Amino acid sequence: MSDKIRILYIDDYELDRELVKDALEKEHGGFEVMEAADKPEFEALLKTQEFDLVLSDFNIAGFEGLQVLEAVRAYDPRLPVIIVTGTGSEEIAVMALKQGVSDYVIKRPKHIQRLPQTIFAAIEKQKLQDQHQDAEISLKESEERFRAISMNTPDHILIQDKDLRYVWVLNPQLGLTEEDMVGKTDFDFLSKEDATALTKIKKRILATGKKEFLKVPLVSRNGETQYFEGSYIPKHDHGGKIDGLIGYFRNVTDRVKSEQALKDSEKKYRTILENVLVGVYQVSLDGKFLFANKKMTEMFGYSSPDELEAIGSIAELYARPEERDNVVEKVLGKGFVHDEYEFRRKDGQHIWVRLHIRKTEKKEGKIILEGLIEDISELKKMEIQLQQTQRLESIGTLAGGIAHDFNNILSAVIGFTELSIDDVEPGTLLHNNLTEVLLAGKRAKDLVKQIMTFSRKGEQEKKPIQLNPLVLEAVRMLRSMIPTNIEIKEQVSNEMLMINANPSQINQVILNLVTNASHAIKENGIIEIGLQEIILDENIISQYPDLLPGKYAEIFVSDNGCGITKENLNVVFDPYFTTKDPDKGTGLGLAVVHGIVKIHSGHITVFSEVGKGTTFHVYLPLYRQQSLLLKSTPQSELLTGGTERILLVDDEPSIVKMQKLMIQRLGYTVATQNSSMEALESFRADPGSFDLIITDMTMPGMTGDRLAAEVKKIRPDIPVILCTGFSEKVNLKTAKDIMIDGFLMKPVDKEKMVKMIRNVLDEAKKKD
């Protein structure tokens, strides 16, 4: 590129153009001149080439000098223009200069020699103007940027003089305005406490000249505390002396509140984690503890999380540490695990826990395991108790069904035997043999009663009884029965305890438990029998789901005998389970005890340790005064018959035959039916032909209680006696509730049935 000054020269007089061109290019040599004779030529050159200056004659045909200036301005406002003219009018010169011409040269003999200097001056002048204009633009842009930043910055900027009076403020805070602050100190609008603290800091900065970072809370005009973060730096004058302060601060109230809210939230959830009733933990894949809450620590008997974490791996808490590998494999495969495992405490005790584990991936890609752990040992015990109860109930239902069928057989055996004895001469061999058969039948009847007691289907004749004398009497009797090498100790409460119970059954409970205890003692030993009142609250009741909170009588029987093994504790109440020699028991004793206790809405527990002994606790609810005592129908002492008409209904032909013979011998007229449906139709055909209906409970087609209800719809005054071996639905109390007039448990002996028939018929006549 050429270093010469490029000039565009327009003049319609060719000679002048040549003179100027020769003078600038040949004589001076520092210029390069391009010529234009008219407007089109000028505009073409102006648009296609670059120039440092334009020379123009003032008088050009159709394109005078000021028009040239306008054309140049339209193209490049910063390109200098010099007008050369032969007319020396000062008015034109002044006008041209006002319009922005760089210089105005009048054609004189020596003007060409002065033209280079004029060109240099015009170009230099334009450079200065450009620099000044650029500076003004930069300043204006800078001011605009500062103004935009100032208007939009969240920062609070301030300047104070050496007396700490505010001289300039940007974005005032705390509800203040610039007018509130300028010319004043902190004491004019801040609290004395805040102003004193700030002033101390500012004076220190003025003295040391060192910048200080601050984070301060200040109270606004409306009483709200706001937080500011920033710094003060010393301000210097032109001589370098400190003459004030500059402060840059940002209102961080929202951030501080968010941080505090986060801290409060963390504290709240930390408190929840520390007080939640389940263990919460985090471990690495290899089992190393990352976190464990207080409950987790306590659950396993450790004094602190640090002590728990020191075991190395959570696998050490598993009863079988190798199980942990399977757990991790499941979590990594499924993402979670919900299952039950056996764990081990610090003291070696095994507990059952329910684990809820999930895997979590951290930002850095590291996988950890998070878990909830719940001690379900007590729940496991309750499940075992429930399973035992369900097992006993199933066995009881089976035993009850067997007892029902056996009762029907016994009814026929005992009934026909009693009829035969009546027909045989007393003292004969046949009479004696039949008597032995009857005794054997009654022993079988007693055995069935035990089975039915275990199955909780037996007749439940209960009344309010004082338990204290009953227990003392049982102890007195047992002292004469138990071997002398065994000492019996009693601990019977002085406070009289009353329960609603069958006395003989409660006596049997004590007898069976003490007999069982005596068999557990091989040589010398002690049996303790106790009675006391106990209040079972909801915490204790949670262990015994079949009980309600309240006051109970507690009977306990304890021995220091051989004890019961752990595997046998869960089956001691099963019927026919025994570890005794054949001559020492049948295995029904504890099963009967369990049945009796359940009949009385109670609960029985057993605790035992091999080689140390066994303790049974029986809990029976104390009697409430509002409980009603069900009285059985009064019965006459004499075995008297009658002439009334009786309808006898039973699906067992042998029982119908036996009972018909028994009743007919007393003078009654007896009609029989083996079907309850046929019996109902027979009664419906002639309701007045019968004075009494005796029906079995369990029959196909229609049960006895339904038959009773149907006949009473036809004839409400007809008395009904219901017989049953056992029933889920009917017992002595519920029989009264459904308007049954008499209730007999099979097998029924002749005397009891005869008395019941006569009493029911007599009661019916009284109502008439």
Image: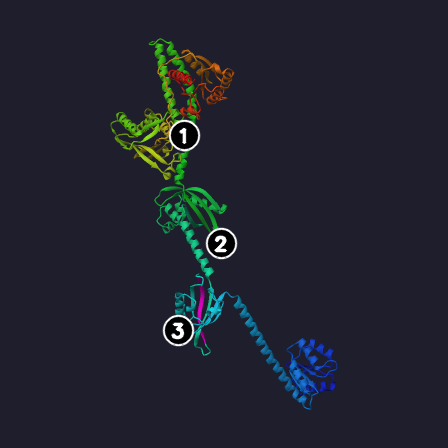
- Residue 420 magenta: no
User: Disc 2 on helix, strand or loop?
Assistant: loop
User: Disc 1 on helix, strand or loop?
Assistant: helix
Left or right: where 126 falls relative to 550: right
Task: Nearest to the eye among marks 2 and 1: give it.
Answer: 1
Q: Residues within 10 Å of mark 2 (few under 14, many from 20)?
A: few
State whether the magenta stretch is mostly helix, strand or loop. strand
- Residue 229 magenta: yes
The residue indicated by pointer 1 is 392
Please tell me the numbered disc located at residue 207.
3
Which portion, as a residue range, is magenta? Answer: 224-236
Q: Nearer the viewer, residue 448 or 183?
A: 183
The total number of labels drawn is 3
Counting residues from the start of the chain, the first of labels 3 and 1 encountered is 3
The residue indicated by pointer 2 is 365
Left or right: where 546 falls relative to 43: left
Q: The C terminus appears in which quarter of the rendering?
A: top left
Q: The N terminus appears in which quarter of the rendering?
A: bottom right
Left or right: where 126 falls relative to 298: right
Location of residue 655 with respect to 525 vertically, above or below:
above
Left or right: where 524 falls relative to 274: left
Tag 3: amino acid: Ala
Q: Quadrant of residue 718?
A: top left
Across and down, in percent, residue 462 comes to 36, 26
